[in-house]
């Protein structure tokens, strides 16, 4: 079971430049709306007199607050945090409160609070010290939850050939057979370091277990995913291992750029509970072939952090790249994820979108180790995945580009058609979760052996033209050992370990 979550904690979310609030004006009945002991049955005693309303307006506007609307009870106002602080003598801080949010999903929602020696304990409520202002108190607006399921937990109809999560991906990876035999990766902790995790109704509808996101960049929200990448690709984990527990780590800034991956790796290793698997759908890019037989000095820190995770017994999966040549998938002990495309006629071929090469930096390492499901050039629009409505991927994939039409979804519907080896890595991480669910004592070399020994050989096609390695019988530098076969890998683990 997931541990109990704190109901409220201090947030690292930056304060907004404009804060919304409500000022209650002194009631003509004599009792403040904030001091009522009985629920009022009539608003009349709470109405303010015209002189009191006028005095309150003057006090609000004098500190720089703008009147948005008014009634006989008070004023709705907006202004910078400093204006509210000047009025109350308190300090505005942000807090994360656990709430039942969209589609009945439990998540943390950022609230603003006024704190200080003279301020009440009630969240978002502040007192005004000067009685001459005729203001009883200030309430900072609390976020409200729309009572609607949006985006849809169900994917939209798309005419392009594609695979859906979880069912199609599970069937092609032969994970469905493992599920029918009771192997779901139950309670195996998988950490995904990426752009974030949006609380999409897809995950709730399928009863997947997702822990609250850890956000590494100061001031970023743990419930936002500007790019949509982490949210969409994480669905691949559950397609393979529906019983796994996902710990997302957001390493993106407010624009969605992955700027804190080393911090993410460190946080993943220090997390409680400790992950059994860390999956990474990102990497760098360097000239190929490189000019030096060693990685650049700038890469040594991240290489050391990856090696440290492996030394701790954590299975580390990295995308091989989409035509990229990067240090991360080459690190000895990493399981690197390449790409295989299943055609509409169910034939398997190497994805020409995915990287594949012999490592010039680490002797004996070939990338990829094994492969997941990846689309083809030019855009690899192949898997229909849940994403935040209107995010970068939602917009970009819906538009024509590179001589290819859009993906057939809307730019704000919360679904997108995409893949890349970013999809292969979490698919393989999910299969690793199945293996560790069936045999928790497996070592990293044993997990690798199970994947490689049972993968479906792919003998058609070639990897990305930058490397252009052909698929052929047996292990190759286009697809590694081939497409992972989840049920066969689990049976191999049970039989051999």
Image (spheres, helix red, strand yellow):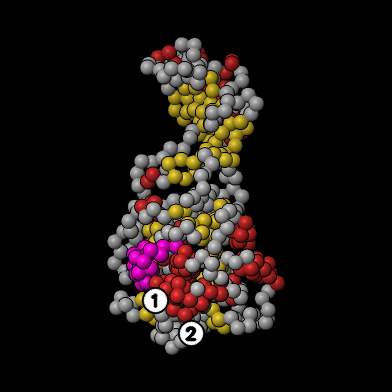
Q: Nearer the viewer, mark 2 or mark 1?
A: 2
Mark sitting on residue 48:
none
Q: Residue at x 43, y 13 (%)?
A: 45
Under circle 1, the secondary element is strand
- Magenta segment includes 447: no
CA separation in Å, label 2 and label 1:
17 Å
Neighbor class of circle 1 (other Cα within 10 Å; few <14, some 14-19, many 20+) is many
Q: Circle 1 is placed at which residue position? A: 341
Q: Nearer the viewer, residue 217 or 377?
A: 217
- The residue stretch that appears in magenta: 163-185
Under circle 2, the secondary element is loop
Residue 53 in view: no
Residue 348 in view: yes
Which comes before the other along the chain, label 2 or label 1? 1
Q: Nearer the viewer, residue 191 or 323?
A: 191
The percent coordinates of residue 334 (x first, y second) are: 57, 72
Q: Residue at x 47, y 64 (%)?
A: 437
The percent coordinates of residue 116 (x first, y second) are: 64, 29
The percent coordinates of residue 372 (x first, y second) are: 44, 73
């Amino acid at each position: 079971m997931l541990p109990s979550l704190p109901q409220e904690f201090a947030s690292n979310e930056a304060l907004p430049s404009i804060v919304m609030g409500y000022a209650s004006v002194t009631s003509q009945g004599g009792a403040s709306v904030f001091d009522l002991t009985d629920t009022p049955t009539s608003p009349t005693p709470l109405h303010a007199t015209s002189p009191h309303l006028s005095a309150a307006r003057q006090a609000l506007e004098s500190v720089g607050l703008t009147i948005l609307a008014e009634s006989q009870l008070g004023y709705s106002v907006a202004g910078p945090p400093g204006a509210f602080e000047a009025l109350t003598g308190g300090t505005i801080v942000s807090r994360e409160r656990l709430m039942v949010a969209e589609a009945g999903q439990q998540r943390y929602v950022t609230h603003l609070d006024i704190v200080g020696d003279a301020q009440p304990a009630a969240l978002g409520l502040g007192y005004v010290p000067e009685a001459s202002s005729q203001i009883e108190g200030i309430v900072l607006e609390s976020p409200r939850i729309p009572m609607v399921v949006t985006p849809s937990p169900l994917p939209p109809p798309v005419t392009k050939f594609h695979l859906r999560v979880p069912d199609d991906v599970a069937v092609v990876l032969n994970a469905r057979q493992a599920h029918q035999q009771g192997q779901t990766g139950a309670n195996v902790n998988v950490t995904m370091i990426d752009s974030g995790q949006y609380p999409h109704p897809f995950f709730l509808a399928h009863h997947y277990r997702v822990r609250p996101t850890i956000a590494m960049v100061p001031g970023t929200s743990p419930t936002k995913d500007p790019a949509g990448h982490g949210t969409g690709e994480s669905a691949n984990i559950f397609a393979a291992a529906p019983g796994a527990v996902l710990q997302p780590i957001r390493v993106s800034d407010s624009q969605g750029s992955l700027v804190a991956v080393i911090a993410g790796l460190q946080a993943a290793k220090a997390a409680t509970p400790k992950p059994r698997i860390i999956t990474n759908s990102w990497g760098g890019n360097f000239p190929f072939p490189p000019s030096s037989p060693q990685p650049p000095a700038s890469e040594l820190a991240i290489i050391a952090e990856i090696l440290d995770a492996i030394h701790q017994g954590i299975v580390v999966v990295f995308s091989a790249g989409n035509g990229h040549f990067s240090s991360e998938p080459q690190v000895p002990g990493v399981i690197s994820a390449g790409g295989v495309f299943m055609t509409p006629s169910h034939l398997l071929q190497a994805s020409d979108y995915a990287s594949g090469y012999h490592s010039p930096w680490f002797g004996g390492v070939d990338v990829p180790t094994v492969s997941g499901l990846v689309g083809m050039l030019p855009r690899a629009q192949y898997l229909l995945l849940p994403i935040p409505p209107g995010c970068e991927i939602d917009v970009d994939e819906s538009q024509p580009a590179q001589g290819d039409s859009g993906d057939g979804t809307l730019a704000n519907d919360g679904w997108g058609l995409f893949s890349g080896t970013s999809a292969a890595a979490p698919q393989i991480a999910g299969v690793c979760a199945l293996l560790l669910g069936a045999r928790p004592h497996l070592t990293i070399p044993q997990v690798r052996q199970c994947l490689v020994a049972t993968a479906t050989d792919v003998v058609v096609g070639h990897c990305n033209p930058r490397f252009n390695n052909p698929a052929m019988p047996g292990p190759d530098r286009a697809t590694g050992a081939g497409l992972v076969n989840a049920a066969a890998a689990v049976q191999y683990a049970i039989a051999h370990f």
